[in-house]
Image (cartoon, rainbow, N blue to C red):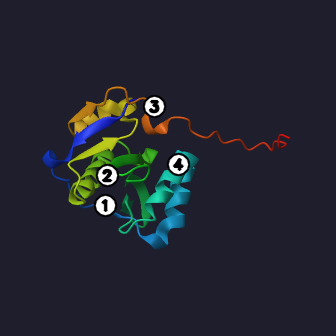
Amino acid sequence: MADLLVKLYDLPPCPQRDDITIRHAMPYEKHTVLAWVQKHFGDGWASECDATFSRLPVSCFLATSGGEILGFACYEATARGFFGPIGVHEDSRGCDLGRVLLLACLHALREAGYAYAIIGGGSGKIDFYAKCVEVLQIPDSDPGIYSDPLVSNTTEKKPRM
């Protein structure tokens, strides 16, 4: 999947929700957030999300209601200027949370001084991103930064001699 480029100096405003809080994750919430991301979206995204907790403010936004996580979105997890990953719980999809989380992260990147952001591997969800912001597919960017990933193997292997 190719990367996407987003122009940050021409973003739509970030919508506000009365029923849902959109905010940066707090460092003391790290284990709760990572466990939620791992449970709903897997180890890879949990690892990327983990990297965001080494920044202040934490470069992960949460959508919460009543002390429960409904969704998350990260920026500068894999590389500087990159957006992602993003995920919304199945029960909360279809109510614009993904768009709100995306825009919160993109506005944070703009406030950090970036003119453009990269959505790594975003062409797989280009319909979603194109509904939210203007995106351009970056030529020859597949697999991009995600080339040669390590394979997780839980079976024990004997070392080679």
Name the quadrant of the N terminus: top left
In the displayed structure, 81 sits above or below 121; it is below
Q: Are marks 1 and 4 in contact (CB under 8 Å)?
A: no
Q: Are marks 2 and 4 in contact (CB under 8 Å)?
A: no
Which of the two discs, 3 and 4, sits closer to the camera? 3
Q: Are marks 2 and 1 in contact (CB under 8 Å)?
A: yes
Q: Of the two numbered discs 2 and 1 on the same chain, state the one appearing first in sequence.
A: 1
Q: Residues within 10 Å of mark 3 (few under 14, many from 20)?
A: few
| Residue denoted by label 4 | 40
Q: Secondary structure at mark 1?
A: strand
Q: Secondary structure at mark 2?
A: helix
Q: Secondary structure at mark 3?
A: loop
The alpha-carbon separation of the residues under discs 1 and 4 comes to 19 Å
Q: Residue at x 40, y 35 (%)?
A: 121
Residue 104 figure quarter: bottom left
Q: Position of residue 133 (x, y in %)?
A: 21, 40
Which disc, if any, is residue 101?
2
| Residue denoted by label 1 | 22
Please tell me which residue lies in front, 128 or 113: 113
Q: Of the two numbered discs 1 and 3 on the same chain, state the one appearing first in sequence.
A: 1
Q: Position of residue 159 (x, y in %)?
A: 83, 43
Q: Residue furthest front?
A: 161
Q: Position of residue 73 (x, y in %)?
A: 38, 52
| Residue denoted by label 3 | 143
How many numbered marks have been drawn onto this rendered protein structure?
4
Q: Residue at x 61, y 41 (%)?
A: 150
Q: Of the two numbered discs 2 and 3 on the same chain, state the one appearing first in sequence.
A: 2
The alpha-carbon separation of the residues under discs 1 and 3 comes to 31 Å
In the displayed structure, 116 sits above or below 56; it is above
